[in-house]
Amino acid sequence: MTQQLSKHRHISFTAHYTGYIWYQMGISHPALATAKGKTLAALVHPIESWAEKYVGGSMRTTLKQRHSILDNHLKELIEQHPNLQVLEIACGLSPRGWWFRQHYPNITYRELDLPDMAATKQAALQQIESNVDEVLSVDLFTDAFAAAFEVFDQQRPLVIISEGLINYFEKPMLQQLIQAIANYGQNFKELRYLTDIYPEPTQNKLATIIWNSSRLLKWMSRSAFSFHFKNPAEVENFFQEAGFNQVEVLQPKQFFEQATLENTQQHLGDLVWVIQATNK
Ligand SMILES: C[S@@+](CC[C@H](N)C(=O)[O-])C[C@H]1O[C@@H](n2cnc3c(N)ncnc32)[C@H](O)[C@@H]1O
């Protein structure tokens, strides 16, 4: 049966850009770096370099932050649960699945994206991995998402990961997505959702640039790209409402500067946060 075209498919080009950034960072494989990604990265490069020199940070520096915090969390989870199962939704051309499958052969790591991107990823992975499982071809807002959970063993812990995804949807759809994860994953021995999120850029020197870039991104991706939360408490309430009992919001300042900041309920000014939610 042919899958209907998703109205979210215009978001997919962004994965070529981030995919190329992961390659430029030296953490990916040439097979996951596309010509489209190279062109997009070259287009944005002058603005990014200007921001890094004069403002002290850029979009790609936030990419690096979010990616390494997520990787770190995942490594910790694997140490706690050597039989972990991972489903990376909206995987794009990220090298994470490839890297973790090479370094932790005992875990199960599956990836999922919209049909066209899933096919592109699958073709790239086939060049660099042997016996690679099929990249699941699913629109997260369809019933097919429920079926993606059936691929896994409920007796083992499951972590769902997303990166660079959830700002693209308006709040009710985001609530629907998080509820779906909590709901479809409720019978697993343990369920976690690990994701990044861009909060409202309130106190950062880059705030105006970020607001303007977000409007451009919204227009280019024909999505509802926006910032949904102003402080960690709002995130916690939102995830709890969706069915996750424990919600941890990690801000890069706490992570990289080892800040022993007492009041973590404050927005510390970072452009991206990482959320770890569990249903226990
Ligand atoms: C900004 S890219 C991020 C890709 C990757 N996670 C990374 O960090 O490089 C967003 C991804 O979300 C995927 N996506 C958007 N809407 C989706 C949906 N409704 N269902 C599944 N994937 C979706 C796009 O195809 C794209 O690969």
Image (cartoon, rainbow, N blue to C red):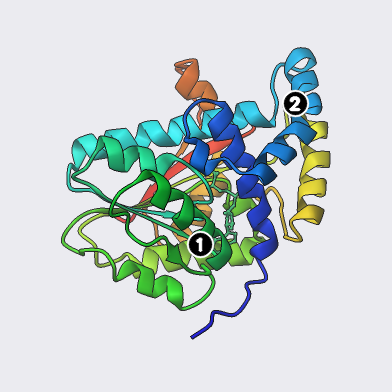
- Would you name the residue on which mark 1 appears? 119
Q: Is mark 1 within 8 Å of ligand 1?
A: no
Q: Residue furthest bottom?
A: 1
Residue 269 can be seen, yes or no: no
Q: Is residue 185 above or below residue 34?
A: below
Q: Quadrant of residue 158?
A: bottom left
Q: Quadrant of ligand 1?
A: bottom right
Callout 1 environment at 10 Å: few (<14), some (14 to 19), or many (20+)?
A: some
Which badge, 1 or 2, comes first in the chain's sequence? 2
Mark seen at residue 246: none
Q: In the rendered view, does 235 fall on the left or right side of 145?
A: right
Give the distance between the C-alpha atoms of the residues marked 1 and 2, in whole angstroms: 30 Å
- Would you name the residue on which mark 2 appears? 48
Q: In the rendered view, does 175 fall on the left or right side of 203?
A: left
Between circles 1 and 2, the one closer to the viewer is 1
Q: Position of residue 7 (x, y in %)?
A: 67, 71
Residue 193 can be seen, yes or no: yes
Q: Quadrant of the C terminus?
A: bottom left
Q: Position of residue 31 (x, y in %)?
A: 50, 42
Callout 2 environment at 10 Å: few (<14), some (14 to 19), or many (20+)?
A: some
Q: Residue furthest front?
A: 127
Residue type pointed to by label 1: Ala
Q: Quadrant of residue 266?
A: top right
Residue at 41% across, 47% down: 127
Q: Is residue 105 above or below residue 85?
A: above
